[in-house]
Image (spheres, rainbow, N blue to C red):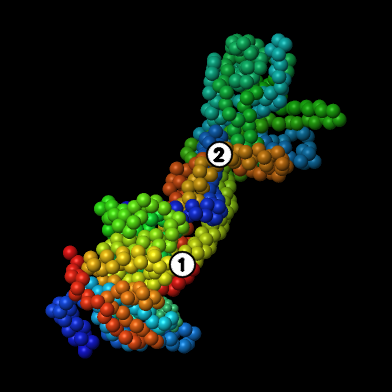
Amino acid sequence: MQAKNHTENLGKENRSEHSLAARLRDLSKDYVLSGETVHALRGVSFDVPQGDFISIMGPSGSGKSTLLNLLGCLDRPTSGTFLLGGDDVAHMNDDRLSETRASRIGFVFQSYNLLPALSVVENIEVPLYYSGQLNAAARNRCVELAEMVGLGSRLDHRPSELSGGQQQRVAIARSLVNDPRFILADEPTGNLDSATTEEILALLAQLNDEGRTIIIVTHEPDVAQQTRRTIVLLDGQILSDERLKPWEAGSAQLS
Amino acid sequence: MGSWFRTIKLSIKSLLLHPMRSALTVLGIFIGVASVIWLLAMGEGIGRAAQEQIASLGARNVIVRTIKPSSDDVQDGGYGLTRNDYVRLLATVPTIDKAIPIRIVSQEFRYKTRNFEGRLVGSTPDYPLVTNLVQDQGRFLTDSDLERERNYCVLAAESAERLFPSGNALGKEIMVDDTFYKVVGVMQPRAPSAGIGGSLAAEDFSSDVYVPITTLWRRIGDMIVITKPGQFQRDLVEVSQITIQVDRRERVLQTADIVRETIALDHTLEDFGVTVPLELLQQAETTRLMFILFLGMIATISLVVGGIGIMNIMLATVTERTHEIGIRRALGAKRQDITRQFLVESTVLSLAGGLLGVLGGLFCRPLSVAARSLLEHWFPQQMETLPDLIRTVEPQLVSWSIPLAFAISLVVGILFGVYPALRAAQLDPIEALRHE
Ligand SMILES: Nc1ncnc2c1ncn2[C@@H]1O[C@H](COP(=O)(O)OP(=O)(O)OP(=O)(O)O)[C@@H](O)[C@H]1O
Ligand SMILES: [Mg+2]
């Protein structure tokens, strides 16, 4: 009962205050491995305002990927509250989670995760297939997105014919195809050289300027420096939460 | 609808990534579906052959034939059906519509310098009626021919051809056993009737010469002496065969029993046999059942083996493509989307097998002819022992066997695809993503 009131209050807050992209309260995630319980996350709480650009850092095994997977609705928390917009993700069933991933979240992986049998455009199209928006206009948008990330001349290439940076740009274009508010990236530049890393970061910054909320996991302080806010995890808990640039400054509103 | 089309396109694409593997997987379904089509075609062929045979022998006919008993039992050389049997049958069995006594003797026929060996058939005017012979020229024998024991004869088509290659046989006199017979008619050609296993051999009407049975009795008599090198044989037979036409089809079997009992009363020897063409139906049913059991077994086994093959390949595919499944799930695919993708893939495989099976089924006629001639070449004795019906059966494609084949392959694809597809869908997205 209390939890419900709490949720309703949060909902009101959302409407009255600046709109929040996500709110995490006391979020924890346990993995049970052969009888032993691993506490990957132990009570993480923070708010993500619309249009923020957050980097998550921390040593290996500190729970960064676990946190990002929860934020990306790939998994459900063991306990705690995770509100995405106004919706309680912890209580969604598998289909609702899938719908949420399809329509509201763009995910970018460290290893790009393109489908090797499909061309650049076809890879960008895949999320449309699952959000049920596959029509001529959406197809045109795929081509536009490919052009936006600088791959207009390689629409029919396979992933294996592209460089790492190019593949990651395809992955970013793919994450944008359903026009999500929320873009999550787990070490998006982890496999790239510094020049390419700069290109990708510029692309993400541009998307953030357009008003999209972005959270990236990174090991590189240089990368974290270019975001608006850095959250450091240690052993599944928040060690620090530091704002580098005010998020209001970006006049972050989606048109 | 469009998304289904896309899913099907996608699955064909991913199946073509491993063409050899997909082709081998399809083999079992191919054999199974082809067997189903063959099975139905064979059954249909046997059924039709039986119907044709019954029609050619007469569905309302009961055939009583003289059978030569073992030689020890024959005392004075006399055996078989008699004129008296014929008269008694007509008098005592009310369901008989017509009864035709037939006496068949091997003879040599001559006209001028031409001659040939054939069957001299003594019979009555109703003979063409019960044997489906059709008049070509002139007329058949008449009652008055019989009464007056006329030396008239009617030629079967081929007999006329042999003695009178230039035609116009009518009015000519041919010589049989030192007696001249005037040709009053010629019959149209007729396909030989089929034999019924054992008691009734196939009958070839092509080299017959028909004369009034009374004339035959008088001129040739009942005694036939056969002299072959080192063998001397006397046969005393009055009637070779009595063909009975029963008034109604339902009474044929019953009439046959009565006929058998009536004749047996007067015969101490086992010197006659009763054959009912209608019984062919039962024989055909048994043969058909045998085929259906045999091919049905092959079909079932290969469909199950084929299905397991599909399941095996699909399970391997699910493992191979776990990472892909993870990516698709992360991009928003629901469990049912994954299920559908893999189910469509297994069904496409199975339908491909079904399609090839239908093609194989369409070729069943030339293939079965080829198979039969090969078998006859390699195993002539074994083939001899097979029933005629099987040796000569012409498979007849049944039109509804094609949709049936597709339905079967659809069911197999879905049935054996469900488990792998569900397994793919149950994968945890994060676990699947980690899988390399
Ligand atoms: N599926 C899982 N099953 C069991 N334990 C897991 C699972 N995923 C993560 N863990 C554990 O949870 C903890 C946090 O893992 P996580 O992957 O979030 O770390 P990370 O911060 O992303 O590390 P890295 O920087 O190496 O990627 C680790 O101790 C890990 O072993
Ligand atoms: Mg990680």
Q: Chain of mark 1?
A: B
Q: Residue furthest left?
A: A16
Instruction: Determine the quadrant in which ligand 1 lies.
Output: bottom left
Q: Can residue A11 be seen by looking at this rendering? A: yes
Q: Chain of mark 2?
A: B
Q: Are marks 1 and 2 on the same chain?
A: yes
Mark 1 or mark 2: which comes first in sequence? 1
The amino acid at mark 2 is Arg
Residue at (69% x, 26% y) in the render: B105
Above or below B229: residue B374: below
Above or below B21: residue A37: below
Residue at (86% x, 30% y) in the render: B230
Q: Which residue is mark 1?
A: B322
Q: Position of residue B64 (x, y in %)?
A: 62, 37
Disc 1 secondary structure class: helix
Disc 2 secondary structure class: helix
Choose between B183 and B364: the one closer to the eye: B364
Q: Quadrant of the N terminus of chain A?
A: bottom left
Q: Can residue A85 be seen by looking at this rendering? A: no
Q: Is residue B359 left or right of residue B370?
A: left
How packed mark 2 is, by other alpha carbons closer than 10 Å (few <14, some 14-19, many 20 or more), is some
Residue at (50% x, 51% y) in the render: B353
Above or below B13: residue B377: above
Q: Position of residue B267 (x, y in %)?
A: 68, 41
How packed mark 1 is, by other alpha carbons closer than 10 Å (few <14, some 14-19, many 20 or more), is many
Q: Which residue is mark 2?
A: B365
Question: Distance of mark 1 from mark 2, alpha carbons?
Answer: 46 Å
Q: Position of residue B325 (x, y in %)?
A: 42, 65
Picture quadrant of residue B222? top right
Labels 1, 2: front one:
1
